[in-house]
Amino acid sequence: MEGAKGNARDKDTVGDAVGVAPTSRRKFLAAAVGLTAAAAATPALGNPNNQPPNVADWTRTLGDGVATRPYGHPSQFEKEVVRRDVQWLTASRESSVSFTPLHELDGIITPNGLCFERHHSGIAEVDPADYRLMIHGLVDKPLLFTLDDLKRFPRVNKIYFLECAANSGMEWRGAQLNGCQYTHGMVHCVMYTGVPLKILLEEAGLKANAKWIMAEGGDAAAMNRSVPMAKALDDCLVAYRMNGEMLRPENGYPARLVVPGWEGNMWVKWLRRIKVGDEPWFTREETSKYTDLLETGKARQFTWVMDAKSVITSPSPQVPKLGKGFTVVSGLAWSGRGTVKRVDVSLDGGRNWREARIDGPVFDKACVRFYYEFDWNGEPLLLQSRAMDSTGYVQPSKGDLRKLRGVNSIYHNNGIQTWHVKADGEVENVEVG
Amino acid sequence: MSKSAERIRHPEVRAISALTRVFDALRRASKSGGRASFAGFAARSHLRMTGLALAILCLSALPSIAQTKPHHYGIGTAATPEQIAGWDIDVRPDGQGAPPGKGSVKQGEAIYMERCAACHGEFGESAGRWPQLAQGKGTLASNDPVKTVGSYFPYLSSVFDYVRRAMPFGDAQSLTNDELYAVVAYVLNLNDIVDDKFVLSKETWNTVRMPNQAGFIDDDRETAEKAFWNAKPCMSDCRPPVTITGRAAVIDVTPDDEKSRRRGGVE
């Protein structure tokens, strides 16, 4: 692939996570593929002693008592449902990314322990007793808040998706990674509990020329981004809980910025400081990184909004082979511009489309779950999904996106994904033309 | 914008009349088939705030205002000048925030070799997959763009602020102000932006011209990509028969952890 060659020379860290493996790696072991194939269409054999007419072990004996698992974990049989990284992508794991296993999940909420990670200098382990949020700059009264202070303010609960701007960045030049965990796994969707940023800014009192804020993290990258005041006062939050419990360290414990619908890099984790100013800062993360290089050599900056996007999570390359007969196609869709209004599914690579069924709640700037059910007769499929949002935006094909942006953008790749389902039920990531 | 800030700070004054106006506007917009939604409007108005968008801001703030009076909760403590000084490290393109101090290219070279070269290469050419700092001029429109301080960064502050807060990797905020000025001066010199005798300081800040300062445009997706808004996307016979033009399996770079492939049931 000519694209892979070009990518191989990219030496940037994961913000530019579009590289290709420095050396070719060995193929899956034939044995492993064989096992996968055997397990696909027919149920696993398991242990007949636990199956009817026999009575299973767990039906005869006592199990663990309460509180033997004071913080519960998934079943021992779900150990493969984990975040994974692509080690050739970055120079170090401290400045890298791990991906949400989208192919193992359903509904719209991502479990906390499976939310993708993106750190620039590793996970800051912040002692909540020492946590402080500083608000200063163009304010009447510079303030320091403790975590307890933040928890005293009125709070709201909001479900939002968070997508890294580099999600699918490795696919700009062609199909590269076999699995939606890797192609689309830099997204998650949880319920945040936190204080509207507006309340905190008003507590400090904005001066008349206050037009921008700069949010800064307390990690060893002290990650900083500029956010226009209109957005800061509209729907941003300083969140301290996700899915009811305190934020995980990987996600910014004890407090992070929530910038609904906008690129994940702006959702500064381990938030330690908000400075109010009258101009943007043009930080490294909004100039050298997180800008979208076009074919002309000019780059778009401040491309905050995440456009509508969707992906079929099952069938997909990492899940068991598809068997003939009744089939549920399941997928995830989101838009940073509003709500997802509709999702279409194509079985023939985008020639013909049918409307999918959105199931479960539909929230502003949150993920929705869609299904398309049909009988698969064993003919090869080119599966695609296409999201439409409340502004009328329609997720474009990869070809249409490349026509307008070229292939050097790295960020904001929301092109339509194609999965090839082969006659034997195996699924692979392909490009179509 | 100052007007808007004023209004936003006193939303209760205007909220009710704004609410009426906004509902009318939204109703009109949705009837006409326009892209009317609170989210859509709010998102599209971030740079050029229209009166309508302003009103929406007030509107969306309404429920919380109703619940959250009074505006000042008396929570938090005053941040002292000393506390602020310890954390106030950001620097803007105009040099606002730049600390006192200075450093020469020559001084910077010694610091760079000791603290930076292992990852970034002695000439900024990068070791392994760490970011490349120098060269790359004229590559941005090519099939192999190389984005460096010289070829891509628009402002001196974009690199200075970053080094000040995040470098050296793993030993952040360990450089003195003089060392910081020196090492940034050296990186500029590696990119032929300043000469060998240059001394970087607050005083010389504005003499530095970054080559790619004019290389950026604001987000224009809503006009440049207008075609992606389509109320009635094609549903049938939308394109000629489709062929596969590329396969991830051929590139073969997916992590080969066999367990990432799920098998059916329990084995």
Image (spheres, rainbow, N blue to C red):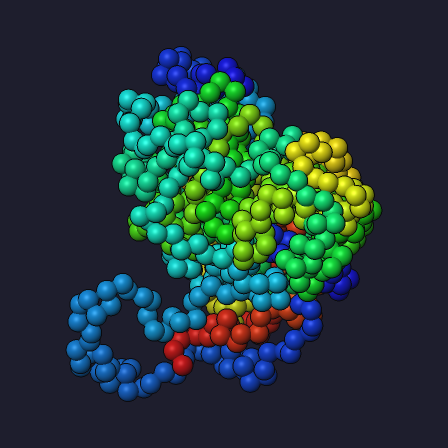
In this view of the protein, can residue A370 be seen by the observer? no
In the image, residue A161 above or below residue A373: above
Which image quadrant for residue B188? top right
Q: What x and y, as percent, mark residue B26?
A: 48, 22
Q: How many marks?
A: 0
Residue at position x 31%, y 24% from top?
A: B72
**Could you tell me which residue is drawn at 58 percent across and 70 percent down?**
B255
| Camera-side residue of B161 and B62 | B161
Say whether residue B2 is left or right of residue B132.
Answer: left
Residue B266 vertical position relative to residue A322 in the rendered view, above or below: below
Q: Does A204 sit above or below residue B163?
A: above
Q: Is residue B155 visible?
A: yes
- Residue at x 24%, y 68% (from the top left corner): A69
Q: Quadrant of the C terminus of chain A?
A: bottom right
Residue A203 located left or right of residue A397: left
**Residue displayed at 55% across by 71% down:** A425
Classify B223 as above or below B163: above
Out of A231 and B120, give the one closest to the viewer.
B120
Residue B48 image offset from top left, x and y in percent = 59, 23
Q: Quadrant of the N terminus of chain A?
A: bottom right
Q: Residue furthest right?
A: B138
Along the viewing direction, whichever of B246 and A238 lies nearer the viewer: A238
